[in-house]
Structures are given as C-alpha cells and as structure tokens.
Amino acid sequence: MTSLHATPSALDVYSQAAPWTNATPNRILKTAAVPVSLPYIGMTAWDANTARFSAVSPPDPTTGVQYFCIVLDDGGTPTGMRYDFSLNPVALSGHSGAAGVFETLADDCQLSAFNGWTYVIDPASGGHYFVCAASATSPTPSNGLYWLCLTENYKFFPPMMQVYQPTSGIEPQGVWSIGETVWFTKQDGSLWQVLLADVLTNKTTSLQQISSTGIVQGIVTDATAAPACYVLSAVASAGGYSLVEFQAGNPASAVTIETGFALGTIKTTPDGAVWKVVSDLNPNDLQQPKSEVALLVPSYPVNGRNPAWIDPFASADPSLYPAGLTQSIMDAIPLSATDILLLTTPNASSYALNDTGGSMVWQMTRVGIGVFDQPAVPLHSYSGDALTAYSQISQDLIKGGPTANDIRAQYSQMSAAQAGDYVTALATMTVPPTFSNKAAWSGVQNDLQNELNDLVSSASFWSAMSQVVVVQSQIESLAASYVANALVIPTTATLISSTARQVNALNIASVTAGGAGSVLTCLGGILAVTAPEGAAVLGLFSAAAAVVGLLCAFFGSRNTDYSISVSDPAYYISAKLGEVDNDLGKVFAATQDMITSYAAAATRDGGILATVGALYRNGTWTANPPDYKAGSNEVPSSFQAYRDGCVHSYLQAFVPLVTAINLIIVNNDQQWNTYKGKPVYVSPTHTWWNTMGDNYKGALLQYASDSDQSKPLGQDLDALLFTTLGYSYAEVFLQWNIPTTPSWISDE
C-alpha cells in the first residue's frame, strides 16, 4: 500500500509544527486501540532495551511501506528482528533462516553493547540499512558505527555487520538519521554528521562536526524543502539534567523543555515526532501509573510556541479502547506521531520480566491517535500590522461593512461553495498601495488561502457524510421491512402479558449502545496496515474507529439495549418495529448532530482543518452517496454489504426468540437429540462437519401452543435461511444462539 500525499499548499503551514496532522492512509476519526501480538524468535524476554533501541524506517520511496527493528538479547549474541507496520516479521532477502532475524556479528565478533540504532534507506540504490552505535568484543577501539544492508540478497549466512571507523576515538554514543544523513555523538559529547554513502565506503568526505551542547538525545527535522534540523540535548543542571532544544549548529538558541530530565528516554520517528518513553518493567513496583508515555507538542519551537510534553491519550474516550489503555502501560515503541505500540498488562503486578511463555509473542496494544483527538494546533494569531491586514482582508472578502472584520468567525457556517468563492476572491486580491508592510499582508493572505482551501474540502466532506447517513438510514429501513415481511412479523405490538419474559437483544449494525449514540461510533477503521504487494496483510480493525469505512459497508454487529418480547400465549413476536425504527431514527439523527459538531470543531483548530481537508482531497476519506430513491427495493452496490449485514442482524435477533433447534450430536455412531416439546414445524435434518472433522446434525423447530398451531414466523425458515439467503448450516446452528429448548413454554 503506497502512502498518499496531500498537495503541499494545504499542509505547508501546519505540518511543520504538527507532524500528527499528516494525511496518511491510516488516519482515523477518533482515537482507538486494538490488542495485537508481536511475534519474536526464540525464548526471549522483553527487557529494558527492547523498546529503547528500536528503529523505524522512513517510507520506502518505491512502495511507501515502512518497517521497524527491535533488539532481541537472550544472553548470547544479540539479534535484531525486522517487522513491517502490519507486525509481520520481514526476513533478509534470500535468507534461509528465521523470518525477520539478523545477527549482530562483525568480523566474527559480536556486538556487546548498543548506544543507539537507526534505520536508513539509501535514496540512490533504495537499499535498507540498519545502523547502530555499538561496542564489539574486539578489535580495539571497539566502539564504532556498525551497519548491515537488510535488502541485499545474501549468499553466506549470517551476514556480517560492517564497521565505520574513519578515525580513532569516534566511539559513538548515539546515532540518528534524517534522509541520507547519519548523525552521531562521541564520548566527549560532540555532535557529528556524515552521509550514508561515506559510511558504506568508510570515507570521511562529508564528515563534519556540528556545534552542540550537552548530551544529545535526538534530532528531528521540519520536513520542508530545505529542511532545518533541531537537536534535543540534555544539559547538566542542579541535581540532574535539563532537556533543551535548538536548531542544529546554533546551541545559543536553545529553549528549555523540561527540568529533571532522565537520560535515554527520547524516541524520534521519521515523520518528525518526539516521544518520551520512561518504561517501568519492575513487577514489584505497583505504583500507578507505570510507564510514562508523552508526545512533544510542537516538535520544535515554532510561531512563538515552545514545545511541551502532552498526554496524547488524554482527550480520547476510554470506552473506545477498553482492552488497551485501561491497563497498565509497561513500555512503548512509537512508530509515528499517530501510531504507537504499547506493552500492556491487566495490572502492574501481573507483569513478569522474564516470563517468556511458550507462544513466542508479546501481547501488546496498538493505538492510533484520531484526528479529533490529536493535540490542538491553533489558527495563527495576529498583532500589529498583521492584525490590521487580517481585518482589512476580512472586510474585503465579506463585504459586510466595517464591522465584518473576522472571516474566521464565518467558517463554521460556511458551505464549500462559499469557501470556494472566497478562495477565488482572495487569489486576485492585491496589497493596497497605502499598506506599507507588504510582508505582513502577504503572510496573512497566504494563511487564509491555506485555511479556505482546506475549508472547501472539509465542508465538502462533512456535507457528503450527511448525505451518506441519510441514504444509510433508508437502506436500514429497507432491510427491516424485508425481514418483517419475510418472517411475517406484526408491525404493531400485541399486548404483552405481565409474565412474558424479555429475551435476547437486538444485534444490528446500525445501532450502538451507550457512548455517543451515533452511527459513526460503530464503524470499523484500519489503524495502520501497510504491506508489500502480495503479502498477507493483518487488518487491525477497531470497532470504535470511524470514517475510514465511511458508512458504506457492514463491519459487524453490536449489542444494543433494544429488547424484544414474545407475547403470551400466541407466540407472535411483539417486536414493536415501529418503536425500534423510531429509536434507530434517533440514532441517525444523533449522527447528523455529531457530523455538524465535528464540522464546526474543525473550523476552530488549524490542525484538524488541514488534516480533514487533505484526507478528503487525496481520497483517503471518501463519502460519495449513491443515487438511491426512497421506497425502491433496489440496493446500490456500494451499500449491498451494509444492507445484507442489517438483514443478517435482524434475522439473528428475531429467529432465536420463537424457534429452537434439534441439535444432534454424533459421536462413535451414537446420537443425542436435544428435541423437546411439541413443534409445529421441523425442518429437514442438515449435516455438516467442523474444521476438526467432527460430525454435526441439526434441524430448525418452531413451537406453538395447543390453542394456536400456526407457524409463529409464518413460513418455513429452512428455505428462507439456507436457500434464499444462503447462510451456512454451521453458522445458523452453532453461532446464532438458537436455544435447544423453546424460549417460552405454554401452560396449556
């Protein structure tokens, strides 16, 4: 899956200060987490260096795929393991050994200690290189930069890591990379850089020292056409260290981010994010919270805003990831500004440092930070000449008199067409001859041009989303009518006896229980799935995420609080379909309200506005409702799966209420029937086998009272389920929770 890139004009302003606004294919609406398993080779326990010495690759320029490596140290030769972002191990090309594993051997000597890892892709050859600052058992001096090509087709195994040691005493203590430039520090604290080409050929042509201070902890870039690099460094202060940040080569410009900083806790990612991960793997330490995970916002000083640590999960709804962040976080591997792997455990005391188990997988939680939960990026504020320019431009655009001097106040009420008209007008606007500060005017004009362009796309998206919800509501009603007619379910409720029991619950794709009560909250989203063409992609689906699926497909049933009753004694289903439809209508209305709320919120936050605009423009988020006429029985092809899912869910909810099954268990030529009572309908007996080769038989039953021998569902269910709709026998008999005895027994 190749990464999609937004047009530069929309993201120039905001992506510099907020890499999490990048419109990548894995962006979701709301923060969500999913449990995942990270496989590894050998009986290797997760230790303090597993996450610390991880390395994430930039996107491959050919495929857009990204990878990451971690260290595996079982007490022998430390080995590395490479994964793609779908968490599949990726072996060395041509390697016949274990998938994903490469050994850290150099000239028959193993690397004994690591001081940092990085992952570099050569823009010339496309080769992938693992580079580390490490010590070997010999020769002397043992410290150096060691590298290994991960994409070369090796003939002799294991491949040896090569050393870069152009001058004595380099002894690197840390290593980072930006593009093809490798950065490293020496034991004396000095900061150096060299091109990857020189590392591979052991040359010093590009080797140079960069003015620095303190103990360098990480390096990031602003990702512009002529990128500026920023250095994070720990400077000794009273009782410890202070974390400062400055533009590379200019330590005098440093701003202080944190006092009392702990060395070795910084992780940077190729998209420019800075994470702080302070792990806590001590099973005897029950103090909560455990590991500290924080994101630096912004990544470097910009627009007068100094960076500060924030909790990236603070504003997320905990109900969206009940299996994730409610647990104790022990450690973390950041993959990007919006994608992170957390080592979690149900409680702090249950984590055992050396518990390797027999499955050879680490149970983790993967978190995708949603667009509406990302750190705030305020719209640029103005003062002086810039504020005067903003007011004048607003008046010229709005043309509403001298008080109409705030174009941004109109954003929340602005349609895509109106925003487009303003874009056209703004493009032809020139600096008034009487306005002396032309740079201030041009700067404001450029800001508003970006914002209005994003508003055109953002407003188009939310408008299209509203139309999709309307169509979805119509499709859901069509599915409900189909099931009601097929089962001859009365559309009005019969009197329910005071002794009638409430049975089962309605499972329907378009309904969600609790939470925000909107259709948006029950859609599936893909957190971060990229893999080479033809590879087995692990779809990391989250039932809490939204918009990636865009309401056009069925993503599984959700339990709801809508209950269905069986009347006494006639066995008619008193489904109260009118009331259910009314409740569903409220859910769809709530969805429309949520869309309106999101659309308005996006106009007040520069990061959200830019991200949503770019996601819609580049086709990552699409919302194209089909031409569907209400009352028609023809379902648009893009909604067919959704309609079928609704039909499935309704049937699964209603059928168990008035039927039972005769489940015949076949074992060693003996059979046990679960048949009880006096049904008025018995389907043919059907036979199937499970994946283990076990034999099963089953028949559908419909029961009735002595006074009413009509078929409660009005027809032979067998033909409807297995012939008309084509459900498998095993699914209906084993997965639909149909009881082996009737859910109601008459006193007659």
Image (cartoon, rainbow, N blue to C red):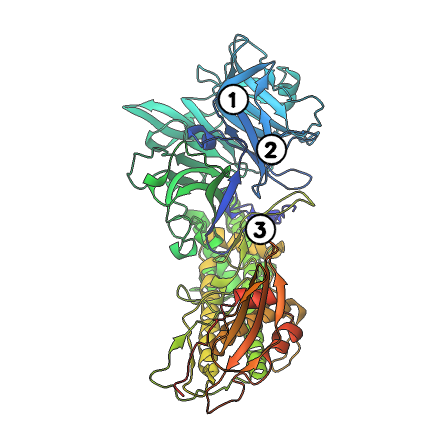
In space, the residues marked 2 and 3 are separated at their CA atoms by 20 Å
Q: Amino acid at mark 3?
A: Gly
Q: Farthest residue toward the bottom?
A: 707
Q: Can residue 671 be seen in the rendering of this structure?
A: yes
Residue 100: numbered disc: 2
Question: What number of labels is visible?
Answer: 3
Nearer the observer, 684 or 223:
684
Q: Amino acid at mark 2?
A: Gly
For image coordinates 41% across by 22% down, the residue present is 215
Residue 78: numbered disc: none
Q: Which residue is mark 3?
A: 539
Q: Disc 1 on helix, strand or loop?
A: strand
Tags 1 and 2 touching, CB below 8 Å: no
Q: Disc 3 on helix, strand or loop?
A: loop
First in sequence, mark 1 or 3: give its number: 1
In space, the residues marked 1 and 2 are separated at their CA atoms by 26 Å
For label 2, the crowd category at 10 Å Cα-Cα, with few meaning under 14, some 14 to 19 and many 20 or more, is many
